[in-house]
Amino acid sequence: MVFGQQKVTLREKYQEGELYLVEATTEQKGDLDVVPDARQPNLPKRLSKTGKAQSQYLERVLTVDVGQLANKTIRKYLVLEAEQKIGNDSTQAKLRPQLQHVVLDRKGLQAVTFSPDGPMLIGELEQIRTDVFLPRLTGLLPKQDVVPGNSWKATNEAVQELTDMQKVDSGSLHCVFSQMETADVALIKFDGQVTGATPTGSNQQTIQGNYRFDLKAQRLVALKFEVTSILMDRDRKRVGDISAVYSMTRKPAPSQTLATTGMTLEASEENTLLLVQEPRIGLEMVHSRRWVPRPVNDKSWIIDGPSGSGLTIQFEAAGTIPQAEAVRKQIEATLSRSVQNLKPLPDPAGWADAQRLSWTGAQNGKEYVFEYFLWKKGGKGAIIAGRYFAPEANLAQKDVERMIKGLRVGP
């Protein structure tokens, strides 16, 4: 049956409390360049990369803006899992069972994602980030009523949501109203090439896909696109090629419920904490998002903080951790070699697991507070060196106290 050429309106307006079910899949493949290493002359020049992911979740609208677009939602994940293989190394990931609910706050330029169920792993946060926030795809829709054959350009906000770009430097996506597939469903095709920055570096993406819009429901109900990415380093040198296929469907969920009674749905310092787990050495720690942990090794761990602050943890057996007074002069002598105007501060109060020592001084023209923890718990111990940018030292100290009080190492 051929449907008419009458003008149609493709608009989305959300209501608080609205609930729908989303299912999405991603498959990718490509190649990554290997950084040459003189110590490993037999390394291959390129490694193959494959991966796939799937998710299924209920999403409830919490708030809408003045244009009735959803800007804050809560999801209840039924499925969230992914697997990846680079060369011969395979990894698998899924949302831990104790975390089901995730709040996505997208008011204005804000982008805060957290779980009211507890601290999230950075890998869980990254997995959820790759699931498209559907209300931001309204930029794929035309601003005027359209008939088949009409075309328009997608907004940069919609392009960023599709491509995971933090900024679009050049290019655009071109949308065309292809046809009415049924009396109520419009098919829109889109394609284009864009260049910009993503969380993993700069890249150029060539995209081709389509979406379906239900006129009765006034909703984008299905999306599918293929993308080929040319990955580039800081010097815009090509370092890899990845192609991916993304598919998504959305439908109402009138028989489902997503209860939020007793949940804190506003972002706070406590519910935005992140969790680090390293099963290999039995390590666990929660930290503020102001701090960025580096990979953990068996002997030490570095955590970068804001404004030049930082933390270095050196793991030791509990029996080798000295008393604070026994190492005060040794630590002071070590600091004095790189710190100007070093002066002792009153030692902050410790607790059963930790003794503390503290100094102030300057490095590279900036004032810092230097703090050492002598920590032991059970048979495990650590010497922990902290450096806090002086104007922010009180907040940094509170952050670090939380991290160390929650530190677990070993069985």
Image (spheres, grey):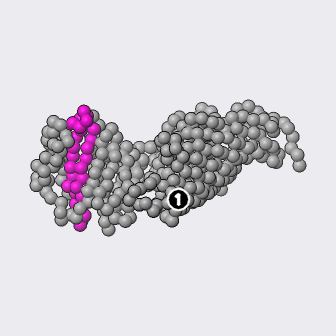
Residue 203 vertical placement versus 85 (above, below): above
Horizontal side, residue 261 vs residue 249: left or right: left
Q: Is residue 369 magenta?
A: yes
Q: Amino acid at mark 1?
A: Leu
Q: How far across and down, in percent of the image, does residue 245 sit?
A: 64, 53
Q: Residue at left 42%, top 53%? A: 119
Quarter of the rendering containing residue 256: bottom right
Horizontal side, residue 289 vs residue 356: left or right: right
Q: Is residue 275 magenta?
A: no
Q: Residue at left 55%, top 44%? A: 203
Frontmost residue, 193 versus 98: 193
Residue 332 vertical placement versus 411 (above, below): above
Q: How far across and down, in percent of the image, does residue 373 sit?
A: 21, 52
Q: Is residue 73 something that shows in the picture?
A: no
In the rendered structure, which segment of residues is drawn in magenta? Answer: 361-390
Which SS type dominates the magenta stretch? strand
